[in-house]
Amino acid sequence: MGFRKFIRVLILLFAYTSLITGVIFGLIILTGGFAGISIILDIFLPQLTMLAFVYLIVMLLVIRLKWGQKKWLVFTVFLGFLSFGLNILPLFGVQTTIQSAEAQFNTTFGTNWNNLIPSELKTKFRTSPFNMGEYFNGIPISSCNLSYDIEYTFINGNDSLRFDVYLPLTGNGPFPTIITIHGGGWTLGNKGSSNSFQLNRYLAAQGYAVFDIIYGLAKSSLRDLTKKLGIQNILEQSSVNYNNSYTIPQMIKNIGTFTNYLAKYAAKYKADLSQVFVLGRSAGAHLAGCVVLGFNDSPYGSLFNHSLRIRGGILYYPPCNMTAMLDNSLAITAPYRNLIDIQEMFDYLLENNITKYRIYSPISHVKANSPPLLIFHGSNDKLVPIIESRNLQKAMLTADARCILIEMQFQGHAFDIFSGNPYTQISYYYLERFLALAPGLT
Amino acid sequence: MKEMGRSHKGLNIIIYISLVINAVAIVLSLIGDFKIRDFAGYIYLIAICINLLTIFLNFINFNALNDKGKILKIICYVFLAFFFFALFLLIFKQIIFVTEMDPTSNRYLIADLIHKIAYFGILGFGVILSLFDLKYLNRLETWI
């Protein structure tokens, strides 16, 4: 075999492998993943639709190399367009998602909700839920005043719990306040770059005081696993050490400590305590749900400072019902289950107390006067299934409370990692409108 | 050798469309307004598709035995390779932006620069390929 022919065979091998991989990736996007396939793919693939064009490029290359061989050409074109079509699929769910979100905003805030937003706020808003330019370039980074790593409590003789604060560049305040709580399965994650700091910057530029906090993580075999894999630093990027021995009740207590700190130093940070929102992602959304819904009368309501007035909660892909863990219905993908002992982790997190599974479930504290919720959840989320959010919304609406659930078509867990993703853009668009409208409901 | 075959005529039309679309995409992409950015994005999407179509029409039309055909062949292969990597680089910026908090850091600025090279490179290559096609369009020996 000559050198040229060898290279040609290699290129063809690479090309067909790519196209077949493309079909598999496409099927993962379509179905939300299969057992045995890493959850990482479920999270990232639906956000990277731009890569669908790669399969067209590979197809063109093969067409050139196989020109004249009709059967191969038909097969290649079929594979190429199938890979492309399946991988670009999430783009076609954008319109459905927007229509559903519009319908829910109409139901929650009335059909003229757009006119209820003050015009001075509207000028800062995104004018459409999806911008094709930002699909290729990402949402531009907003400017704000940022202070890092401020300690709000020092506990257990070792643990310094801290926060970052994002403030608008101009204005004397006080600014409506947002407390953001990071995700990471209660055992991983961090504030800052692990907690969508781009959105924090964006909201600060809109006129909000954003407090991005750490709350003390738990130990778990998941944490040990990330250490073994050498990806713990990537996931956490933390310069702050703590014992990682916290349970969910202690995390809630730490968040309560932060509310006391915030009440004490509200003037310093120009925070308007009469307009406070709590935003969380994944495990952080669970904690945010507990704070928002359990703020006044849950067994842990007394931990929070009641000079803060909670106006709403924004929950990204939240686990809402911890009791589901008792019967294994809180779906964790099969490979994830095999890697760590999930039940052991949850028993630790909830202090081996079955009652606490219920107490620390946001859905247990839904009442008629609960603050309004805005929930974003990927329809193909296999880590925290969308049924969790659907059940919470159902409970809220049954109790006559307000709740909007925006289901992001074809998206998995953590769909908002990349700002260019159309569904991240959609979440920005409706989030800023919710923040403007929600105070009118409470 | 075929004289101005049907595919060749198809290429004739595409070259002009490609030239205009790529040029318009470059100009619009330099404007920062939200609505224009949206419009530019759609033009960019069309430019990507037109560029892929131009490469395809070149692949099936150029005469690789001829010197000018060889030049087109090389441009097409280089464009395709660049295209392949550029799509990954467009995402690379968003990955860096997720992990880098300081917009004035070198890492951030380099990611932005790489993104711009990838973004405008696709359009630039589209213009270059169209100009070469235009140049050789009436030289029949370039085409099969």
Image (spheres, rainbow, N blue to C red):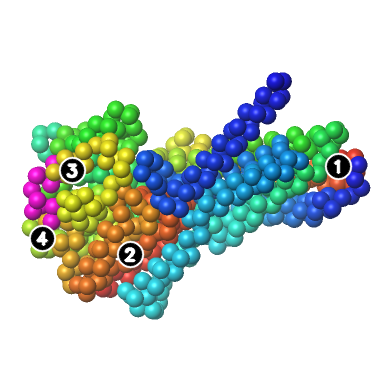
Chain where mark 4 sits: A
| Residue A201 visible in this rendered orientation of the protein | no
User: What is the magenta segment's predominant secondary structure?
Assistant: helix
Magenta residues, as a range?
A348-358
Contact? badges 3 and 2 (CB < 8 Å): no
Residue B128 found in image quarter: top right
Instruction: Answer few, some or many: residues within 10 Å of disc 1's Cα (few below 14, many 20 plus, some between 14 and 19).
Output: some
The quarter in which the N terminus of chain A is drawn is top right
Locate residue A255, reporting x and y percent.
17, 50
In 3D space, how far apart are the residues under numbered discs 1 and 2 (Cα atoms)?
Answer: 58 Å
Which mark, residue B144? Answer: 1
Q: Quadrant of the C terminus of chain A?
A: bottom left
Amino acid carrying label 1: it is Ile
Q: In this rendering, do the residues under marks 4 and 1 share a single chain?
A: no
Three-letter amino acid code at the position of disc 2 = Leu
Which residue matches tag 3? A343
Queried whether the magenta region covers residue A350, the answer comes back as yes
Q: CA distance from mark 3 to mark 2?
A: 28 Å
Name the chain letter of the residue that bears numbered label 2. A
Mark 4 burial class by Cα count in 10 Å: few <14, some 14-19, many 20+: some
Residue A421, label in figure: none
